[in-house]
Image (cartoon, rainbow, N blue to C red):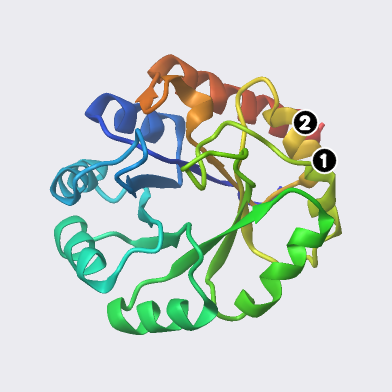
Amino acid sequence: MKVLDIKICGLKTDAALAAALAGGASHVGFIFFPKSPRNIAPSEAGRLRKAAGGKAKTVAVTVDADNAFLDTIVAEMKPDMLQLHGSETPQRLTELKARYGLPVMKAISVREQADLASIAPYRGVADRLLFDAKPPKGSELPGGNGVSFDWTILARLDADVDYMLSGGLNAANIGEAMRLANPPGLDISSGVESAPGVKDTALIEQFFKAVRAARSDRAA
């Protein structure tokens, strides 16, 4: 069975980070977007990054951030990867990869099959893609809205498209998501929260347990 990467995103506390690492997260994400309830200061993310102790790759998530803000994030957090969750162009990705020497994951908003056409310009530029549900009308957040999309459309992707599946995932539906899309990576944020921006260690534990059960079922 292929390796399945799992990113717990929007971390802000030692307890949530510890739960993510204990569950076996391959990636942990820190969000730098003032409008998000998961927003964190670069210095605090840097402290948590040290606590991660190299057990998982650390990801800095930004939304159309300028170079000055990114310079601060990279200097204070020292992430292993950048995740761009705004309207960044392929040219912008190329510029940032050269500027920081870091791999870049680009988020793509998906609601229907036609939305997958937007990945073409990023292929060969983004080191990885992240498919998230398009935000509900009126939402100021590009992600973390707790909504999902039709996962069956991802089954038609070329086999060489490396991505993480995000959007509305939780312990109750992750088995179905894995069965329908068979993604190489999972990204969860609001699905392991007791309130917006408040990670629940029990829900994190339940999510990993559900993933293990789903993988065991698939293997059987």
Question: Compared with residue 121, is residue 110 higher up or lower down, i.e. above or below?
Answer: above
What x and y, as percent, mark residue 64?
40, 63
Task: Calculate the distance from the C-alpha at mark 1 to the C-alpha at mark 2.
Answer: 6 Å
As shown in the figure, which amino acid type bears the numbered disc 1? Answer: Leu
Question: On the rendered structure, is 68 left or right of 206?
Answer: left
Rate crowding at label 2 as few (under 14), some (14 to 19) or many (20 or more) other CA atoms within 10 Å: few
The residue positioned 49% from the left and 83% from the top of the image is 91
The residue positioned 53% from the left and 79% from the top of the image is 90
Question: Compared with residue 51, is residue 153 higher up or lower down, i.e. above or below?
Answer: below
Residue pointed to by mark 1: 180
Q: Picture quarter containing residue 84?
A: bottom left
Residue pointed to by mark 2: 176
What x and y, as percent, mark residue 147?
64, 33
Quadrant containing the C terminus in the rendered view = top right
Q: Which mark is residue 60?
A: none
Q: Are marks 1 and 2 in contact (CB under 8 Å)?
A: yes
Q: Secondary structure at mark 1?
A: helix
Question: Compared with residue 18, is residue 94 higher up or lower down, i.e. above or below?
Answer: below
As shown in the figure, which amino acid type bears the numbered disc 2? Answer: Glu
Question: On the rendered structure, is 156 left or right of 42?
Answer: right
What x and y, as percent, mark residue 19?
37, 26
Residue 216 appears anywhere in the view:
no
Question: On the rendered structure, is 112 left or right of 205?
Answer: right
Q: Secondary structure at mark 2?
A: helix
The residue positioned 68% from the left and 36% from the top of the image is 148
Residue nearer the viewer, 67 or 16: 67
